[in-house]
Amino acid sequence: MSPVVACDMRFVDDSTWAILTIYGEARGESFEGKVAVGEVIRNRAQHHYNCDGTIAGACLAPKQFSAWNGNDPNRMLMARCDSDDAKECIRAWAMVQGGSEMTKGALLYVNLDVVTPWWVERCRQTVKIGHHTFFVPV
């Protein structure tokens, strides 16, 4: 058996991280809801908001997108996701990359029917799409 050799190759590209995150966070939302989650991913990376400025960093930063938390059942669903499951998420990410602005620059979102986090008081709501309410910090 040959030894593993390091190479200059990324095994998972930024679009894959974004699409999987959209799938895990907004699988049950409308197409617009999926685009909106994608916008938050993009906006966070662009503004280095709680991340290193990359899409992967925005998606995988601890406790930022709950679907990636170790105890969230969506994490395994994302790991098993295939292109058929994610078709609408793929289209949504393409729209985000094209410059969509449905969330008006939102960096945060939450389903207020489930939880009201402490940070809501420090933010301005921009829009509500489906079950998610979107915010920008003030």
Image: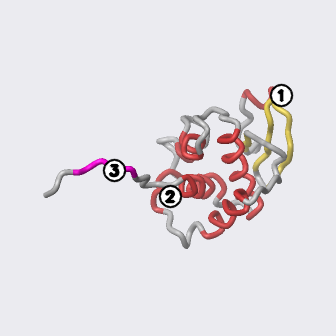
Identify the secondary structure beneath mark 1: loop
Left or right of 13? Residue 1 is left
Q: Is residue 9 above or below residue 62?
A: below
- Asked if residue 23 lies left or right of residue 12, the reply is right
Q: Is residue 5 magenta?
A: yes
Question: What's the distance in space between the residues labelled 3 and 1, CA to CA?
Answer: 43 Å
Mark closer to the observer (1, 2):
1
Camera-side residue of 122 and 53: 53
Indicate the amino acid at tag 2.
Leu
Circle number at residue 7: 3
Q: Residues within 10 Å of mark 3 (few under 14, many from 20)?
A: few
What residue do we see at 74% from left, 60% from top?
Answer: 98
Residue visible at 72% across and 32% down? 117
Q: Name the residue furthest front.
A: 8
SS for callout 2: helix
Q: Are marks 3 and 2 in contact (CB under 8 Å)?
A: no
**Which of disc 1 and disc 3 is earlier in sequence?**
3
Please state, as top left, top right, bottom left or bottom right, where the N terminus lies in the image. Answer: bottom left
Three-letter residue code for mark 3: Cys
Point 85% across, 34% down: residue: 124
Locate residue 84, reporting x and y percent.
Answer: 55, 73
Image label count: 3
Q: In the rendering, at what x and y percent does residue 92 appear?
A: 69, 62
Q: What is the number of the mark on residue 77?
A: 2
Q: Amino acid at mark 1?
A: Val
Q: Which residue is most to the bottom?
A: 84
The residue where tag 1 is placed is 138
User: What predominant SS class does the magenta segment belong to?
Assistant: loop
Residue range of the region highlighted in magenta in the rendering = 4-8
The label on residue 55 is: none
Query: Which numbered mark, 3 or 1, is in the foreground of this view?
Result: 3
